[in-house]
Amino acid sequence: MQRYTTDQLLGIVRKMFSKAGCSTRDADTVADMLVAAELRGIPSHGLMRVKDYIGLWQKGRMNMNPNVKIVHQTPSTATVDADLSPGMIAGKFAMQLAIEKAEQVGSGWVAVRNSNHFGIAGYYTMMAARKDMIGFAMTNANALVAPTFSLDRMLGTNPIAFSIPGNEEPIFTADFATTPIARGKLELMEKQGKASPHGFVQDKNGVSSTDPSVLRDGGAILPLGGDFEHASHKGFCMGAMVDILSAILSGANFGPFVPPQVAYLDPKPGAPGEGLGHFFGAIRIDGFRPANEVKEYMDLWIRTFRKANTSAEAERVVIPGEPEIAKELDYRKNGIPVLPKVWEELVATAVSIGLTEDDLNN
């Protein structure tokens, strides 16, 4: 498997999105987000997404030169219209706005409508944590998830992220889908020839399946828990909360009306809202006690949990965010691995917009 430096991949993505019409600033934002996903070991939200974004733009469903703007606000809240931008352009704008509001009044909360896929949620929450704030980020997504007892796909994988800074310890970041797996990871499994674990997906008849391509034949992803006996109703509750905060507050589409984030599937007719939605929050930690006290206490929390006794010598309690930090250290030193099929798709997408493989490599 070929490895590429961070700068190489940043340059490749910048070239492609600049060619598609993004400003230099926006192309940098898209590139930074997609490569951040690769660095943190989340390739399902990295280079694999380029073909989807470019495909949506080619279908007129993504705006590479958007006018992202505030359409409603109070001192601590706002609603942002993304103008069908790549989600990370609107997402970065919205989280920066939430941080600015938190600096002024203690907390900031921003809902976004009329957007597209926004990458990894933890990227935004870490923006807040670096400012001595707690960060929240979530987004709804196109309906691939069957709620408990349902055959119909009604919700997206609807991820949630939360970050809080420590003092000496790294930022604590929990970033997870409200399902056992995201669509992109199923796609990655398919490319790798792997089966999906039991309890992750069901076929069109509601029967548990291990086929990662089952979504193409009317199957669905299951909520966290997998089935009722394993508390899938709680995963359904979490996914519903994300959908409500992301769509009902902003005026984005909800549930089954969220537009697919792939070009080969058309949006559902009669959708009541605009695009898909996100929700961001930032809270100053010094709103509760001095920031250094909060961060030092967070260090103690992390160290206490890290030292917990475990059931096997080879296992330990993993603090949320630690595996991603380890991946980033490795990949920055040794290069980021890119699957051959992902590179082939990247080259084919580049050719479709008038670039060549040599353009990507130079």
Image (cartoon, grey):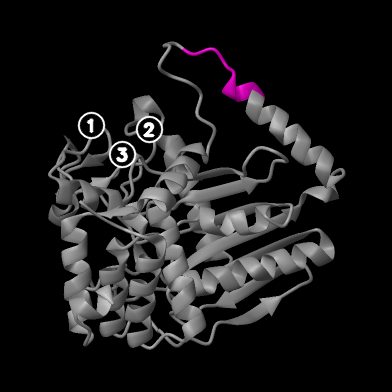
Residue 305 counted in the magenta span: yes
Badge 2 element = loop
In the rendered view, tell whether residue 222 sits above or below residue 252.
above
Quadrant position of residue 315: top left
Q: How far apart are marks 2 and 3 (CA)?
A: 13 Å
Residue 57 counted in the magenta span: no
Quadrant position of residue 344: bottom left
Residue extending furthest toward the right: 290
- Decide which of 55, 355 is in the foreground and name it: 355
Find disc 1 in the rendering and name its residue: 198
Left or right position of 213 against 361: left
In the rendered view, tell whether residue 68 sits above or below residue 221.
below
- Between tags 1 and 3, which lies in front? 1
**Could you tell me if residue 177 is visible in this image?**
no
Q: Are marks 2 and 3 in contact (CB under 8 Å)?
A: no
Find disc 3 in the rendering and name its residue: 149
Find disc 2 in the rendering and name its residue: 225
Other residues around mark 3 within 10 Å, as few (<14) / some (14–19) / many (≥20): few
Q: Which residue is drawn at 36% across and 49% down?
A: 334
Q: What residue type is labelled 2?
A: Gly
In primary-sequence order, the first of circles 1 and 2 is: 1
Q: Which residue is drawn at 83% across and 38% down?
A: 293
- Decide which of 207, 302 is in the foreground and name it: 302
In primary-sequence order, the first of circles 1 and 3 is: 3
Quadrant position of residue 302: top right
Write down the region rendered in magenta: 304-310
In primary-sequence order, the first of circles 2 and 3 is: 3
Residue 99 - label = none
- Between tags 2 and 3, which lies in front? 2
Q: Distance between the residues labelled 1 and 2?
A: 11 Å
Left or right position of 147 against 127: left
Q: Which residue is drawn at 36% across and 57% down?
A: 45
